Image: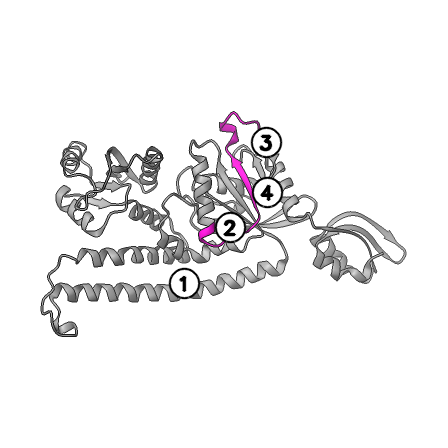
Amino acid sequence: MTPREKALIVGVNLNNQSDFSESMEELYHLAIACEFDVIGRAEQNLKTINPTYYIGQGKAEELKIQINENQAETIIFNNDLSPSQIRNLENELDRKIMDRTSLILEIFAKRARTREAKLQVEVARLQYTLPKIIGSHESLGRQGGGGAGTKNRGSGEKKLELDRRRIETKISELNRELESLDKERGAQKKQRTKSGFPCVTLVGYTNAGKSTLMNAMVDLFQKSESKKVFEKDMLFATLETSVRKISLPENRTILLSDTVGFVNQLPHDLIKAFRSTLDEVKDADLLLHVIDVSHSNHQQHIQITEDTLKLIGAEDIPILRVYNKSDRTTLPYPFIEGNSVYLSAAGKKGITELIQAIHEKLFKDSIECRILIPYEKGNLVSYVNESSYVKSVSYESNGTLMVIECKERDYLKLKEYLC
């Protein structure tokens, strides 16, 4: 096994932020998710940042000692650094420097599996890199000032212009390929819409248990190991959107999709790059906001998720709060309280209550009716059996008599058979 790269995590608490400890703990888990061996941490309280190193000069000297003692190879900052700060820190500490955004981008790059996810991550990384490259050239001399055109520029400015154009060209090429994949996704989405099945999408903070909940529902209602999605107790275990057809009791069917998790300070370029994936959220009929209720800071996680939903334009979609991992708390469970369901996805306790809540949200407007379908319309009977909740069936002399609950569009389709 290849030894993991040793990393030291560093955080600056500006003006006594109340969530600083939580943020540093999350940085630790992000570093672990990126396969670093975290061998230590350093923290500093500041009222204003140092424009040269972000941390103070004295703290930089202390870091040198800590780095040598622990043989740290990479220094990861919990804060976003400017290009000049990264350059100055690398010169001063003689180590690779990462900030929070570059760490998250690295995790996404390692986890991307599908072509679309890889393209989305690459676009985000290039968009993140572009201003960094521009910033890293700020100190280069500008030669040949007066004339227009590249030939009158200094060598530093020429290189800056070439690097900028190369990256912008690459971003354009990748975006064109993503647009092509978007069309394929759109065709798949159109097929799902034609099916008439309501779309239910899992959202929430990373590692809240979305994939575990999806697998619990697949296990209970599909009985298919091959339909399960990857799940692991770590941040950003899932990047790709997975959609599963779930056949619920009372002949109800939903399309359940799992999405990428959210996190505090999720890079804006990532949100933009994953726009097509996040469209699954915007197109949902119902959102299941999965919350790790056992986490000490779950209220902040709720707020971050809700803020992100607003950012992508999904704040008006009906939502159920699913308080997962209730078995790790003293809360009684499973139970339903208003728009909230308390359960344990890993223990498969509370899934029945969740299905009940989903039913009430999605199928409360179902219409009950009696229909008599002539025997020669056997295909229509099959359609009703597949699309509606059939309460009773009897076979009369002139056709099949059924008492059903159906959607309004099916009610209109069956209107001529009402009795």
Q: Secondary structure at mark 2?
A: loop
Amino acid type at mark 2: Glu
What segment is highlighted magenta in the picture? 310-333
Q: Amino acid at mark 4?
A: Lys
Q: Which residue is mark 2?
A: 315
Q: Earlier in the sequence, mark 2 or mark 4?
A: 4
Is 192 above or below relative to 338? below
Q: Of discs 4 and 1, which sits in the foreground?
A: 1
**Label at residue 178:** 1
Q: Nearer the viewer, mark 3 or mark 2?
A: 2
Number of other residues with Cα within 10 Å of mark 4, as a class: few under 14, some 14 to 19, many 20 or more: few
- Residue 415 lies, with reference to residue 333, above or below; the image says below
Could you classify mark 2 by the number of other residues whose Cα lies within 10 Å: few (under 14), some (14-19), or many (20 or more)? some
Q: Residue at x 19, y 63 (%)?
A: 160
Q: Which residue is mark 3?
A: 334
Is there a contact, CB below 8 Å, between mark 3 and mark 1? no
Location of the C terminus by quadrant is bottom right
Q: Determine which residue is flagged by label 4.
A: 223
Pair 2/4: label in front: 2
Closer to viewer: mark 2 or mark 1: 2
Residue at figure coordinates x 29%, y 67% from the top left: 169
